[in-house]
């Protein structure tokens, strides 16, 4: 199964992923606070790490929801939230071991990755450096990704 | 809490803009939110153009740059924060203490978009706080806070402390260092550790206002008016990036960042060497792009830019081994490298960290130090004058000590902190013959002369003084007739005009120029963002309007054709290399100026004609200029 994969070693921290994510999901609005992908940065040393949904086998976000408002998409394996059932208790935020579910306090919305229905915008616009073999984001079989980021093994 | 003066009308607001202006009066401790002046926005878009208009309207001629009446206009443009890409670019406009003229200073990093996401197109900072203060902005919560505990602290430490105080790593901080507190004309405003509003002394203006820092946290978004058109632009941008990554200038820029420029400037004989005496450096290969790449530990980028040209480096050997910095850029490599006879990049990395931390501009300071060393080597300054330092080309240890003296204004540092123009006037003894500046702004890392007459013209006409970011002729000039001035005026004008729309948008010009974007792409992007229709012709008119407008600002301050000149050394014949024995003469510069003025619709004196101002939609300015002409304005001070 294809997964949204990332490599923090080559991530520049440009957050173009967050720019295009919010742009695609909120009718042309750009707001990193409304993106379902984030980048944590350590600016002093120039380190950046993409935070992405891991499409877990046994998703903790689903398990942690007391309202049973989250189910896993059978094909893409991303969490899907039923707004009718969700009461914004944010148990899923704490439940996700990767910190990949986000909450926008201003607008009271939960942000989860939907993989843009199988063609993620973030991956489309993530560019790799000419001196690197790959970009920081990919959408592919994890085995294939492993070969790309660890070519020698 | 800011009071809403007028109700902000959102229904007619174009895309991209937040429509709000933050006005902070430090004297009265008053914070207001005003509505954007839409008429001016339509005319000047944002950034350089719009802020010049605000400065013109609000800062009367003759204002002391370091007095409370000077203002700082800091902010962005409609494209900032949108997927135009490469748009985390803010412009700081003020009256420069170094030149007493218009100053626009640009910075990337995360701070620019954060101010936009906080809900403001720009802020106007006026007056003077009665004690050290910092400005705290969290969306619509704006406060002037006490900064007594921060005054005197180095820049990096201040930033880290303020991030901690904000309780949020993502809060973006812009600060001044000790040099800014001491009102040095070389003082920068630094943001996110490694991004600077560098040139012309903006740090001194904030220092004069007792404003140590600005902390911003923004959580609001920016709406694009025409998402489908924007998507087309994004795809077009991305396709060009993909093509460029394969090979060529874009790929090189992404790998080496700006330091690869040294390979070119050295080859073309315009790499500043030994205080701009020479244009080629014998040990260039030790500090060029390839040598630089050896020091790189990570590639980083400004917000929303897939062409990251920021490089983090680490010094490898010697006393500074292990020191890390985001940078250095080409200008630092050349001005602290070849210009000081220093062929050790680890030293340059340390100089960069030190300048950042002290709040000094690496460009102006590197240039200034070159001049000090030459004064010392020629015996115009004695060992006693310079606190016993052995200031020779190549002696980096002495440079480190001198940097501290400049920032803290100790000993001769007190004079040097004023920048190379004023320092050479005070030291005298003919040292102005080799003090390398235009209008009081130190030359950056390119040596104008017969090897590059275009740079000569570019420096001469730049409103803020010697500047490489208004027109950057390095590579393109090689296609023109060498060692002549043929075609230089239209060439420089074209380069200059390519950048203006992006500086108004406000976006970084680097990705745009490396992708070959011109006015067509600018019009496409701006139309998609704002929902207003812009044509290529509109972009050209914008360029003429902005260029003439800022010209009038400077004329009102007393500047004239005589200020559009170069350092005497730039008119000296080349001593070595290609073009040896030949010089860029004053007559040649005059010819280029005549041509350039004519192309802009200015008189021989460099004054925009009434017709030009009317044509480009500036009737009010035409009237103002007529008034100045009849009053015969006084010459500008110092």
Image (spheres, rainbow, N blue to C red):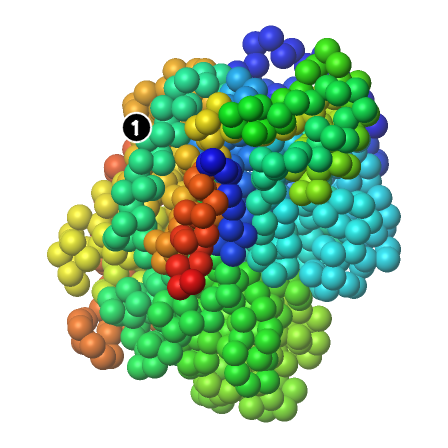
- Residue B306 location, x and y as percent? 43, 44
Residue B34 shows up from this direction: no
Direction from residue B257 to residue B168 in the image, left or right? right
Which residue does the image show at 80% across and 59% down from the upper left?
B151
Does dot 1 land on a helix, a strand or a loop?
helix
Using the rendered view, name the quadrant where residue B582 is placed: bottom left
Q: Is residue B435 above or below residue A46?
A: below
Q: Is residue B131 above or below residue B538?
A: below
Q: Is residue B313 above or below residue B316?
A: above
Q: Which residue is mark 1?
A: B520
- Residue B119 location, x and y as percent? 66, 27
Q: Callout 1: residue from which chain?
A: B
- Residue A77 location, x and y as percent? 56, 29
- Residue B261 location, x and y as percent? 34, 62
Residue B472 shows up from this direction: yes
Q: Nearer the viewer, residue A19 or B364?
A: A19
């Amino acid at each position: 199964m294809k997964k949204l994969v990332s490599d923090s070693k080559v991530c520049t921290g440009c957050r173009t992923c967050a720019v295009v994510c919010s742009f695609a999901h909120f009718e042309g609005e750009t707001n990193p606070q409304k993106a379902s992908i984030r980048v944590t940065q350590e600016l002093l040393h120039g380190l950046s790490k993409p935070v992405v949904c891991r499409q877990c086998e046994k998703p903790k976000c689903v398990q942690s929801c007391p309202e049973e408002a989250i189910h896993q998409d059978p094909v893409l394996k991303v969490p899907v939230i039923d707004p009718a059932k969700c009461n914004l208790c944010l148990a899923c935020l704490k439940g996700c071991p990767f910190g990949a579910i986000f909450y926008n306090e201003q607008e009271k919305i939960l942000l989860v990755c939907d993989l843009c229905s199988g063609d993620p915008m973030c991956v489309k616009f993530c560019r790799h450096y000419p001196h690197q073999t790959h970009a920081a984001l990919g959408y592919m079989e994890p085995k294939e990704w492993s070969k790309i980021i660890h070519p020698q093994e | 809490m800011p009071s809403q003066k007028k109700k902000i009308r959102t229904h007619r607001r174009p895309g991209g803009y937040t429509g709000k202006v933050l006005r902070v009066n430090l004297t009265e401790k008053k914070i207001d939110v005003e509505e954007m002046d839409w008429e001016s926005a339509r005319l000047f878009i944002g950034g350089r153009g719009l802020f010049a208009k605000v400065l013109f309207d609000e800062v009367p001629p003759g204002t002391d740059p370091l007095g409370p009446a000077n203002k700082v206009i800091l902010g962005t443009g409609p494209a900032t924060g949108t997927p135009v890409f490469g748009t985390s670019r803010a412009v700081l406009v003020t009256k420069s203490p170094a030149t007493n003229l218009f100053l626009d200073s640009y910075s990337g990093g995360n701070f620019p978009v954060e101010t936009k996401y906080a809900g403001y197109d720009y802020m106007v900072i006026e007056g003077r706080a009665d004690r050290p203060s910092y400005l705290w902005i969290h969306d619509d919560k704006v406060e002037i806070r006490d900064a007594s505990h921060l005054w005197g602290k180095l820049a990096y430490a201040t930033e880290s402390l303020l991030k901690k105080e904000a309780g949020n790593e993502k809060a973006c901080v812009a600060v001044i260092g000790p040099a800014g507190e001491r009102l040095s004309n070389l003082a920068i405003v630094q943001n996110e550790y490694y991004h600077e509003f560098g040139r012309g002394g903006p740090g001194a203006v904030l220092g004069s206002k007792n404003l140590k820092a600005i902390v911003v946290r923004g959580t609001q978004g920016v709406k694009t008016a025409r998402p489908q058109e924007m998507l087309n632009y994004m795809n077009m941008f991305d396709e060009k990036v993909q093509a460029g990554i394969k090979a060529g200038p874009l790929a090189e820029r992404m790998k080496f960042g700006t330091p690869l420029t040294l390979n070119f400037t050295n080859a073309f004989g315009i790499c500043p060497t030994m205080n701009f005496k020479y244009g080629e450096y014998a040990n260039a290969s030790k500090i060029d792009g390839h040598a630089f790449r050896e020091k790189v530990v990570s590639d980083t980028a400004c917000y929303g830019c897939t062409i990251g040209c920021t490089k983090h480096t680490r010094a490898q050997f010697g006393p500074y081994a292990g020191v890390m910095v985001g940078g250095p850029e080409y200008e630092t490599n050349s001005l602290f490298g070849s210009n000081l006879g220093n062929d050790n990049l680890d030293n340059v990395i340390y100089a960069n960290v030190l300048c950042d931390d002290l709040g000094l501009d690496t460009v102006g300071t590197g240039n200034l130090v070159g001049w000090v060393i030459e004064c010392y080597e020629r015996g115009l300054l004695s060992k006693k004058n310079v606190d016993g330092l052995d200031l020779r080309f190549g002696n980096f240890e002495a440079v480190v000590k001198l940097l501290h003296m400049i920032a803290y204004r100790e000993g001769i540092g007190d004079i040097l902190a004023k920048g190379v123009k004023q320092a050479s006037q005070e030291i005298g003894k003919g040292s102005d013959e080799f003090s390398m500046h235009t209008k009081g702004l130190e030359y950056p890392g390119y040596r104008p002369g017969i090897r590059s007459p275009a740079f000569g013209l570019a420096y001469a006409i730049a409103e803020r003084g010697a500047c490489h970011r208004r027109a950057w002729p390095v590579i393109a000039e090689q296609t023109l007739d060498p060692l002549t001035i043929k075609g230089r005026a239209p060439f420089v004008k074209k380069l200059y005009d390519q950048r203006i729309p992006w500086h108004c948008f406000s976006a970084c010009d680097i990705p745009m120029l490396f992708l070959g974007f011109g006015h067509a792409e600018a019009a496409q992007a701006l139309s998609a963002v704002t929902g207003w229709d812009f044509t290529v012709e509109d972009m050209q008119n914008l360029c003429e309007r902005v260029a003439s407008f800022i010209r009038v600002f400077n004329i009102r301050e007393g500047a004239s054709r005589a200020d559009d000149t170069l350092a005497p050394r730039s008119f000296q014949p080349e001593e070595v290399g290609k073009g040896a024995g030949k010089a860029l003469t004053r007559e040649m510069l005059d010819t280029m100026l005549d041509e350039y003025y004519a192309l802009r619709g200015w008189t021989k004196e460099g004054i925009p004609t009434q017709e030009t101002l009317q044509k480009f939609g500036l009737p009010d300015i035409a009237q103002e200029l007529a008034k100045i002409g009849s009053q015969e304005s006084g010459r500008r001070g110092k």
